[in-house]
Amino acid sequence: MQGKVEICGVNTSKLPTLTGKETRELLEKAREGDKQAREKLIAGNLRLVLSVVQRFGSRGEAADDLFQVGCVGLIKSIDHFDLSLNVRFSTYAVPMIIGEIRRYLRDNSPVRVSRSLRDNAYKALTAREAFTKEHQREPTVEEIARAIGMKREEVVFALDAISDPISLYEPVYQDGGDAICVMDQVRDTKNTDDSWIEQIAMKQAMSGLSDREKRILALRFYDGRTQMEVAREIGISQAQVSRLEKGVIEKIKKQL
């Protein structure tokens, strides 16, 4: 899509722009039923749609399709914008356009989501759109949850389930050199290289122990038994268990 000038037969390099004052005047006329003002308002905000569409350029969808869907969001914004609130039109329109495109991508997503999750997500999206229309801002997850009578976790889970999948190789930042991808920012704090090396070394050290030594370690450090309990289990004295335990630990330390 990058560098594309014509979308849906519209030459994007020649799109008109409107000032804030012009936008408000046209909104007032359109609210009174002036169709010409409404058309001029749509044409004057197509650059806004284009800027939103460019955010979704890496999804593999046709730019023309996304642009058309974005225009639907723009028209909804014009029809529902509240002139009594001291808010810029673009502040209200951008989330509406994004929401319309996300719905389109969700409905055309190859990832299958259960009906119940889709229903919950639809309720959440509808509540978000209604809240945005009334308050001219995006609601928080807690506000959406209260509006539809669901738990916060259920709302988050439902919205996550219908979110668009992102490739691990999706570039998130580039400054002249190599791009930083999503994969570069994904981190597992448990399964690090050091932990893998430690596990391999421990496995090798454990392989040199006898069955009785392995059993003593398992009873002591996995089952949490005392030395007296281990002694009764194996049939030896507590002193022998203590001596064997120390010897095994020293043997493992040397191996590591």
Image (cartoon, rainbow, N blue to C red):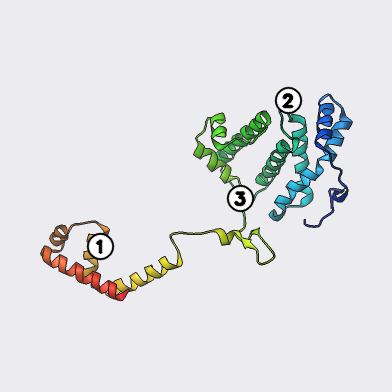
Q: Is residue 230 left or right of residue 182?
A: left
Above or below: residue 14 compared with residue 233: above
Choose top left, top right, bottom left or bottom right for residue 159: top right
- Earlier sequence position, callout 2 versus callout 3: 2
Q: Residue at x 71, y 32 (%)?
A: 87
Q: Residue 158 at x, y = what percent? A: 55, 41
Residue 204 is left or right of residue 126, and the answer is left
Near mark 1 (Cα within 10 A), the count class, few <14, some 14-19 or many ≥20, is some
Question: Mark on residue 111?
Answer: 3
Distance CA(mark 2)–CA(mark 3) = 41 Å
Query: Which residue bears the numbered disc 1?
Result: 218
Numbered marks: total:
3
User: Label 2's element?
Assistant: loop
Label 3, label 1: how far apart the Cα atoms are: 44 Å
> Which secondary structure lies at badge 1?
helix
Q: Nearer the viewer, mark 3 or mark 1?
A: 1
Q: Residue at x 89, y 31 (%)?
A: 36
Residue of label 2: 84
